[in-house]
């Protein structure tokens, strides 16, 4: 088998490993990383200071590498390559043989050669360990300076500001982000970030950094122009330099200013050695963005298989948020091409700057700069990448427009090869293929193609293409819930609420036709319950409930039911455990522990349900709503009460949450969990909403899911106090209940939500729709009117008449047959049942 | 054909089903007060799910045919013909039933 050794485990090195494992190439893979931890998301490094933990930034784990058969070593960097005997040697002297060697060593921060740059409060911004240093230096500091006004410098400035320091940016060049922005864009960016409290100093060359003797600041920076600046900390983030020392030492060709020279196949001057990512030099350029690095990794992997692809360079257009400011740069932002024409729009009131660079004949887009508003970025990028002819008046592309006639690029104009999602390299052709395969819902297309699941920047464009393709096929997505109502669940919710409709019949009369069916009835029943919270088995609602809701238990394959009492937070007393055992024995029930920390009792005949509940209710149990589209469980770990690592009382919080939301009817079931520390033993990130304790409070995740299509929850808000946590969950749930489709879990709902997580944050946290008070009131009403449906049922003789096997006979259903297995009953198979019935006849 | 009283009208549940045992057979009875006739009777055995559950299904209409949906796998059975809408190979028996003077009368 081919022996592949990968040196470096950054984002690109990790991507290479993933691609190689997924390919058809049979290879033994060895990974050697210099950092002590496996690959993590360096692009979102500054979120560390906003509460993301190293675990959350991780792209993989040691365990995962073991699982996929990769031999990985961390914290022991390679120090030597022996090309003669094809081995690499690590710092501790270990030797690894290779057939093919991949250098993904990345880059290191450039520290300007200024005297005094080696003092303790002088740090760099590149790795998670660097962040630890920055945090340590920020302790007790008041002022922080970032040297470097480029993309990385402003990222670092964001980090320094997040640490609560007075933040300065010192740049040698006359403007910020000089590579990506023209002077006008750079000026607008400066204006905007200064308004955010960051002090910007341009055209400043630092001559020396002195230890300060005045008691206030630790350091004094002296500039060539005679000025000076006192600070407690300096972060150097003034660009990167490729890590190419290993390559130099073993005689590979490197560029004049650094970087390991590679060809179209990502091969170095030794054809058994590849270089990819920021350590590689292609066409005289270093590509300091992650997407081109990924393309190199993919090209390098393909060289080992039957269909080698080439790396052709990469577009360096970029869109990002720096200190909360939207910045976009496409192609030739400076208009360097001969004869290029520029169009500029600038509005200092709303602080937006846009510039187009157009070819001399006015037909092609050569470049663009966007500051303060990137909504046109996707459209402009498509014009640029695909060489699409511009409209006769290109300026209309950046001029403010009235809502409704936005000049979006017709999706039909894009060629099949157009890249729509650059994070996952998804083309328009891939999306069309997904539609051809029968995936019409936006959420399905996303999970099928991965489009728009990275940064999400292409969401609007993706929707545009899907809509366009659908109408081109004469398809209209019929969102009617069923033949009785020409409305979506969300529309029905609205109709019921606005019309104060209290019964299904009333709704049917006003807005539907026919008699209803097993699709619309439970959906409407759920909406009525969410809005008015009546007893679900009330006479006017009883026909709306699925059998599980009607009988308050879950029907199993032989027509018997399973019963799940609520065990909030998974906490149960020994006495209650004994009751469950006694009830199970008395009614011959099969017992099993569920995934949600409860106990499920199977095999109850319909006529036994009331007696079973009566015993359970008397012992203090309530219904667990395992049958309902409602809150199931809130799983928890033992938390700080018992655990050596716990930082908050996760059980108490789980109990509170479970008791607050029990009985709430929703478009689908929903689950939650609370973990007492970042080790996450309760698996909160796989729940519809999950809570993880931090030193300072709680982090809230939303939209997670296990099941058929697992999805990790997204970090919604960090370090919340108890009250704010509950407020956000209230609103999140009520907004979901209001707007989701029938049988849509929160994860799919979120994938389909235009604007995704960010939109949800605006609605819940910033109350952008002005409905927060209403959501709060609605939830208070639900919480205040909770009743245990079992208890209400057994207390009412009229309700009990449903719970008989036969209206006219006191007999059992003789087709329900059990056999014993492992000391418990289970339903007989059809063969067993027929045989047993024959024997007893 | 013999006709027997199996229960009273007040034993029925509006827009829903109950189950009766008549001469060893399980019969699902549905009471739809707004329809004519108001009572329907079919076999309780679900031939696809292979369990006695149809009386516990939801009633409604599909393309104007009155149906009950099996609570197990959701196939629809026509209350008047017994036919399975999703799979013509399956059907359930249909019984003649009437509501007279507060009594539910069934003919086997």
Image (spheres, helix red, strand yellow):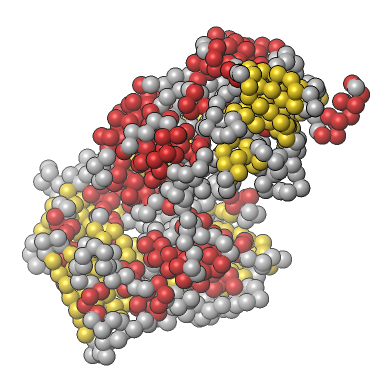
Front residue of A307/A255: it is A307
> Which quadrant of the structure image shows residue A153?
bottom left
Give percent across and percent down for residue A401: 21, 67
Query: Can residue A745 be seen?
Result: no
The N terminus of chain A: image quadrant: bottom right
Give the residue at x 18% y 44%: A142
Give the residue at x 25% y 46%: A768
Give percent across and percent down for residue A361: 27, 90
> Which quadrant of the structure image shows residue A436?
bottom right
Give percent across and percent down for residue A43: 38, 58
Give the residue at x 43% y 60%: A452
Give percent across and percent down for residue A557: 70, 33
Front residue of A486/A375: it is A486
Give the residue at x 83% y 29%: A833
The C terminus of chain A: image quadrant: top right
Relative to A320, say whether A397 is above or below. below
């Amino acid at each position: 088998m081919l022996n592949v050794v990968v040196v470096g485990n950054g984002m690109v090195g990790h991507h290479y490993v993933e691609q190689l494992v997924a390919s058809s190439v049979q290879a033994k893979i060895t990974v050697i990383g210099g950092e002590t931890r496996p690959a993590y998301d360096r692009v979102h490094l500054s979120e560390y200071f906003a509460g993301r933990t190293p675990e959350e930034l991780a792209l993989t784990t040691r365990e995962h590498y073991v699982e996929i058969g990769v031999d990985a070593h961390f914290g022991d960097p390679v120090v030597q390559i022996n090309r003669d005997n094809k081995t690499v040697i690590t710092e501790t002297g270990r030797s690894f043989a290779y057939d093919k060697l991949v250098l993904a060593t990345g880059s290191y921060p450039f520290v300007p050669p200024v005297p005094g740059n080696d003092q303790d409060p002088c740090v760099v911004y590149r790795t998670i360990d660097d962040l630890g240093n920055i945090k340590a230096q920020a302790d007790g500091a008041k002022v922080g300076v970032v040297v470097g006004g480029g993309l990385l410098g402003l990222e670092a400035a964001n980090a320094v500001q997040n640490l609560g320091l007075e933040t300065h940016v010192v740049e040698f060049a006359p403007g910020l982000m000089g590579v990506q922005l023209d002077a006008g864009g750079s000026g607008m960016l400066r204006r905007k970030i200064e308004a955010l409290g960051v002090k910007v100093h341009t055209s400043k060359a630092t001559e020396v950094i002195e230890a300060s003797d005045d008691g206030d600041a630790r350091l004094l920076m002296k500039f060539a122009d005679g000025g000076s600046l006192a600070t407690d900390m300096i972060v150097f983030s003034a660009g990167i330099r490729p890590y190419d020392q290993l390559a130099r030492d073993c005689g590979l060709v490197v560029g004049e200013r650094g970087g390991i020279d590679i060809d179209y196949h990502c091969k170095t001057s030794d054809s058994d050695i590849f270089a990819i990512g920021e350590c590689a030099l292609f066409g005289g350029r270093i590509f300091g963005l992650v997407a081109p690095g990924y393309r190199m990794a993919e090209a390098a992997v393909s060289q080992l298989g039957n269909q080698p692809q080439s790396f052709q360079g990469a577009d360096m257009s970029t869109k990002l948020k720096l200190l909360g400011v939207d910045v976009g740069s496409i192609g030739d932002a400076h208009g360097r091409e001969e004869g290029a024409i520029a169009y500029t729009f600038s509005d200092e009131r709303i602080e937006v700057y846009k510039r187009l660079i157009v070819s001399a004949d006015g037909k092609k887009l050569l470049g663009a700069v966007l500051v303060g508003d990137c909504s046109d970025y996707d459209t402009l990028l498509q014009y640029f990448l695909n060489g699409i002819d511009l409209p006769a008046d290109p300026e209309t592309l950046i001029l403010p427009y009235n809502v409704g006639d936005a000049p979006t690029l017709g999706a039909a104009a894009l060629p099949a090869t157009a890249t729509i999602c650059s994070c996952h390299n998804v083309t328009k052709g891939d999306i069309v293929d997904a539609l051809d395969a029968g995936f019409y819902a936006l959420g399905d297309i996303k999970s099928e193609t991965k489009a728009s699941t990275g940064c999400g920047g292409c969401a609007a464009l993706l929707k545009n293409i899907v809509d366009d393709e659908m109408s081109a096929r004469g398809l209209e997505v019929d969102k009617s819930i069923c033949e009785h109502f020409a409305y979506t669940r969300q529309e029905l919710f609205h109709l019921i609420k606005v019309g104060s409709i209290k019964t299904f019949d009333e709704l049917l009369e006003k807005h539907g036709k026919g008699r209803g069916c097993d699709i619309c009835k439970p959906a409407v029943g759920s909406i009525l319950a969410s809005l008015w919270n009546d007893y679900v088995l009330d006479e006017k609602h009883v026909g709306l409930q699925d059998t599980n809701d009607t009988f308050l238990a879950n029907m199993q394959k032989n027509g018997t039911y399973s019963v799940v009492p609520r065990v909030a937070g998974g906490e149960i007393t020994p006495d209650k455990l004994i009751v469950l055992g006694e009830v199970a024995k008395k009614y011959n029930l099969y017992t099993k522990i569920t995934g949600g920390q409860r106990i499920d009792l199977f095999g109850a005949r319909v006529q036994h349900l009331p007696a079973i509940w009566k015993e359970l209710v008397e012992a203090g149990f309530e219904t667990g709503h395992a049958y309902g589209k409602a809150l199931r469980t809130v799983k928890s770990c033992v938390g700080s009460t018992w655990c050596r690592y716990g930082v908050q009382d996760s059980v108490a919080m789980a109990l509170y949450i479970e008791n607050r939301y029990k009985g709430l009817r929703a478009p689908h079931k929903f689950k939650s969990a609370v973990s007492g520390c970042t080790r996450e033993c309760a698996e909160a990130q796989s729940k519809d909403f999950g809570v993880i304790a931090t030193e300072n409070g709680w982090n809230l995740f939303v939209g997670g899911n296990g099941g058929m299509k697992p999805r990790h929850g997204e970090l919604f808000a960090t370090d919340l106090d108890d009250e704010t946590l509950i407020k956000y969950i209230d609103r999140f749930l009520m907004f979901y209940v209001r707007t989701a489709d029938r049988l849509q879990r929160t994860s799919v709902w979120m994938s389909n939500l235009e604007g995704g997580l960010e939109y949800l944050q605006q609605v819940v946290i910033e109350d952008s729709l002005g409905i927060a008070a209403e959501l709060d009131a609605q939830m208070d009403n639900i919480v205040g009117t909770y009743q245990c449906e079992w208890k209400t049922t057994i207390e009412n003789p009229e309700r009990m008449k449903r719970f008989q096997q036969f209206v006219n006979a006191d007999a059992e259903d003789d087709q329900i047959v059990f056999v014993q297995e492992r000391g418990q009953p289970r339903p007989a198979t059809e063969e067993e049942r027929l045989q047993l019935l024959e024997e007893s006849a | 054909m013999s006709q027997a009283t199996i229960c009273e009208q007040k034993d029925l549940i509006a827009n829903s089903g109950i189950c009766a045992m008549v001469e060893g057979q399980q019969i699902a009875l549905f009471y739809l007060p707004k329809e004519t006739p108001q009572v329907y009777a079919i076999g309780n055995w679900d031939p696809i799910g292979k369990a006695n559950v149809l009386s516990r299904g939801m009633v409604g209409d599909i393309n104007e045919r009155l149906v009950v949906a099996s609570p197990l796998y959701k196939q629809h059975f026509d209350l008047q013909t017994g036919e399975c809408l999703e799979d013509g190979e399956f059907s359930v028996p249909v019984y003649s039933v009437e509501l007279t003077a507060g009594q539910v009368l069934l003919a086997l």
